[in-house]
C-alpha cells in the first residue's frame, strides 16, 4: 500500500521544462523532466553535489571506459549490466570520490536519441534531452555528437539559493577535459530572489544533472552509456552509487518504441493569459511612461506573458520535441553563449538577436520586409541595446572582442531577425562563471539598465517566470554551451502547459502590436502538436 501511494504521488508531480531553438541545425533543443518534488531537498536515487561539507577540489577519480562495440541497444544494455556487476563484486577504485563513465558503441542498429528516451516513459526518474546547435563534440572515434538523452542522475546539483561561484566549483570538480562527454545539463531561474510558485518548486533556484544512463546519438552510430559518481564526504559511497545505478538499469527498457509519424490532433479546452489584454495595455503604457521620463535611466524593459493551455488529453513533452525536430517551425532566441578551451585558452562566442518580422510570401515582399526591419528605428534601438550590452560584458573578462557581422538579417523559415555575432578569448578559466553570471539576465529578456528593468518587471508581472528566460545548457570539461530560454514552456501532468513569451518595450513600442507578437509566439507551440481551437475558451486573467 505504501509503495502504491508513493507511486501515485510521484506521477502527479510530473513537470517538464522545454526550451526550443531557431532551427535544428543551428540551435539547441533542451528539456528537463522531473517526477518528484522538490528535487533540491533530496534527489531520487542520486547525490546532490552542492551539499555543505563537500571537498572543493576535484574528485579523486575521473575516467571514461569504452567497452567492446555491439550490434544493438539491447546488447549494449546487457554489456553494461555485466560490467557493473563485475565492478560491484571487485571494486576497481580506492579513492573516496570519483566519477566514471562506461560507454558501449552500437554499430548496426539505427536509433534516434528521442526515440530511446520515449521508450523510457515508464521510468519515474529525472530525464533530460539535448540536441546541439552544431555537431562540434566528438566521441573517441571522431564521430560528432548529434543528441543526448539521459535518465536518472548520477549526481545532481540543486539548491534553493541563487547559483553561486561555489555551486559552479561543485559542478566543475566532477568534470575534466580528458572526459569531455561527462557533462552537467541544466538550467537557472530568471530571478532567484523572486517567490517560487508551486509549479517551479521541483527545479530549485538552479538544477543540473549528470545522467545515470545516457543514449548518445552520433553521426554514423550511437552509444549507450552509464555514469557512476560517488563522494564519501557527502555520504554517498561507491556502494551507494553502484546500487543506485543497478536499480536504474533494471528498469531501463531495451526495446525501442518509435514515435508515430504524426501526432493526432488535440482540442484545446481552455487558454488563460496572465496578464489579460487589458492589463497588458496598462503595463506597456506604464513602461513607456517610465522610459520617456527625463530623469529615468530605463531605455528598455522586456515584459512577458504566461499562457496556460489545457487540451483534452495530457501533452507528451517528448512528442512536442519530436514535432519541433521534424517541422520547419522556428523559435527565436536572442543570446547564445558557447565556451571552448583550445590550447589552454578559453574561446567564447555569443550571438545577439532582436527585432522580429514574418517572412514574405514572395521574394519581393520578403525583401521589402527585410528592409523595413533593417531601417526600423524602434527595432534598431532594441537590437543595439542587446548587442552593445553583451559586448561591454564580454570586454570585462575577454581579450580582443570582435563583432562580425555587426548587424544583418538572419532569415528563418517563418521569421527573420536582426543579428550580430560576438567572439573573444577569456583571460582565465575562472572567467567562465563570471561571464555566465554577468550576461544573465540578458537585455534580450530583461531590459536595460538591468536593475531598473528588473525592478519594473517585479512590480508589473504577477506570475513566476521560473526558468523561462534563464540560462539553459551544459557544463563540460573542455567546453560549455548556454542559451537564454526565450522560447520555452512548462508541461504539467493533468494541467496542460504554461507557454511563456515576452517582447521588448522601447520608445516607439505599441501595446497592440506587442500583444500580436505574443500571440504569434505562443501559437507556434500549439501548431507543433496540431492543437486545434474549436473548443477554445479564452479566459483572461490579471
Image: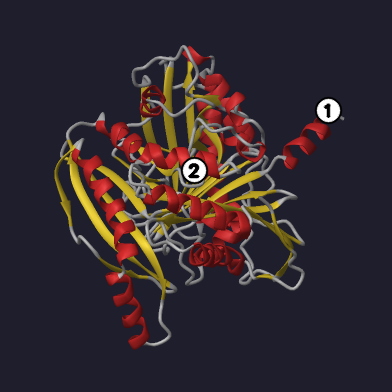
Residue at screen point 47% across, 72% down: 328
Q: Secondary structure at mark 2?
A: helix
Q: Is residue 131 above or below residue 454?
A: below
Q: Is residue 52 above or below residue 510?
A: above
Residue at screen point 42% across, 58% down: 221
Of mark 2 and mark 1, the one earlier in the sequence is 1
Query: Where residue 61 appears, x then y in whole percent?
Result: 37, 23
Query: Where residue 290 appears, x then y in whole percent?
Result: 42, 47
**Coloration of the structure image:** secondary structure
Query: Where residue 398 appears, x then y in whole percent?
Result: 18, 39
Q: Is residue 532 left or right of residue 470?
A: right
Q: Residue furthest right?
A: 1
- Residue 457 circle label: 2
Q: Secondary structure at mark 1?
A: helix
Tell which tag, 2 or 1, sits nearer the viewer.
2
Q: Quadrant of residue 360?
A: bottom left
Q: Is residue 451 left or right of residue 304?
A: left
Residue 413 seen in the current view: yes
> Which of 336 and 243 lies nearest the eye of the viewer?
336
Residue at screen point 24% across, 50% down: 388
Amino acid at each position: 500500500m505504501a509503495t502504491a501511494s508513493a507511486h501515485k504521488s510521484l506521477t502527479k508531480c510530473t513537470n517538464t521544462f522545454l526550451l526550443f531553438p531557431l532551427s535544428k541545425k543551428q540551435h539547441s533543443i533542451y528539456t528537463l523532466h522531473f517526477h518528484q518534488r522538490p528535487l533540491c531537498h533530496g534527489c531520487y536515487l542520486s547525490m546532490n553535489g552542492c551539499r555543505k561539507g563537500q571537498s572543493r577540489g576535484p574528485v579523486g577519480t575521473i575516467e571514461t571506459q569504452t567497452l567492446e562495440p555491439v550490434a544493438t541497444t539491447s546488447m549494449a544494455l546487457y554489456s553494461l549490466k555485466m560490467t557493473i556487476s563485475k565492478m560491484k563484486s571487485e571494486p576497481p577504485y580506492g579513492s573516496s570520490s570519483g566519477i566514471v563513465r562506461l560507454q558501449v558503441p552500437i554499430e548496426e542498429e539505427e536509433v534516434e536519441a528521442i526515440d530511446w528516451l520515449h521508450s523510457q516513459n515508464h521510468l519515474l526518474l529525472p530525464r533530460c534531452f539535448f540536441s546541439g546547435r552544431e555537431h562540434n563534440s566528438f566521441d573517441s572515434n571522431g564521430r560528432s555528437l548529434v543528441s543526448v538523452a539521459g535518465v536518472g542522475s548520477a549526481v545532481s546539483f540543486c539548491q534553493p539559493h541563487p547559483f553561486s561561484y561555489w555551486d559552479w566549483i561543485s559542478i566543475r570538480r566532477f568534470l575534466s577535459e580528458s572526459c569531455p562527454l561527462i557533462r552537467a545539463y541544466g538550467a537557472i531561474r530568471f530571478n532567484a530572489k523572486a517567490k517560487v510558485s508551486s509549479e517551479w518548486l521541483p527545479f530549485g533556484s538552479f538544477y543540473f544533472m549528470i545522467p545515470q544512463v545516457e543514449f548518445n546519438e552520433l553521426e554514423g552510430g550511437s552509444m549507450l552509456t552509464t555514469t557512476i559518481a560517488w563522494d564519501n564526504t557527502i555520504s554517498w559511497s561507491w556502494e551507494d552509487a553502484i546500487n543506485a545505478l543497478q536499480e536504474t538499469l533494471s528498469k531501463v527498457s531495451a526495446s525501442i518504441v518509435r514515435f508515430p509519424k504524426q501526432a493526432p490532433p488535440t482540442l484545446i479546452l481552455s487558454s488563460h493569459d496572465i496578464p489579460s489584454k487589458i492589463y497588458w495595455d496598462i503595463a506597456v503604457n506604464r513602461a513607456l511612461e517610465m522610459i520617456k521620463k527625463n530623469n529615468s535611466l530605463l531605455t528598455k524593459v522586456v515584459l512577458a506573458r504566461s499562457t496556460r493551455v489545457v487540451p483534452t488529453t495530457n501533452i507528451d513533452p517528448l512528442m512536442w520535441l519530436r514535432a519541433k525536430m521534424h517541422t520547419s517551425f522556428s523559435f527565436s532566441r536572442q543570446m547564445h553563449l558557447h565556451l571552448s578551451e583550445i590550447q589552454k585558452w578559453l574561446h567564447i562566442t555569443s550571438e545577439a538577436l532582436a527585432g522580429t518580422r514574418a517572412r514574405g510570401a514572395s521574394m519581393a515582399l520578403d525583401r521589402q520586409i527585410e528592409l523595413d526591419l533593417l531601417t526600423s528605428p524602434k527595432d534598431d534601438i532594441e537590437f543595439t541595446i542587446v548587442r552593445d550590452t553583451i559586448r561591454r560584458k564580454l570586454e570585462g573578462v575577454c581579450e580582443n572582442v570582435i563583432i562580425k557581422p555587426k548587424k544583418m538579417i538572419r532569415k528563418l523559415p517563418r521569421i527573420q531577425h536582426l543579428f550580430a555575432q560576438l567572439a573573444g578569448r577569456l583571460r582565465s578559466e575562472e572567467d567562465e562563471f563570471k561571464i555566465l553570471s554577468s550576461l544573465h539576465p540578458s537585455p534580450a529578456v530583461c531590459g536595460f539598465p538591468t536593475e531598473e528593468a528588473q525592478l519594473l518587471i517585479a512590480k508589473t508581472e504577477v506570475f513566476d517566470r521560473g526558468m523561462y528566460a534563464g540560462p539553459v545548457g551544459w557544463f563540460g570539461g573542455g567546453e560549455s554551451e548556454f542559451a537564454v530560454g526565450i522560447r520555452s514552456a512548462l508541461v504539467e501532468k493533468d494541467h496542460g502547459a504554461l507557454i511563456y513569451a515576452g517582447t521588448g518595450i522601447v520608445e516607439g513600442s505599441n501595446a497592440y502590436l506587442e500583444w500580436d507578437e505574443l500571440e504569434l509566439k505562443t501559437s507556434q507551440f500549439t501548431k507543433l502538436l496540431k492543437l486545434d481551437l474549436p473548443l477554445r475558451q479564452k479566459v483572461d486573467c490579471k
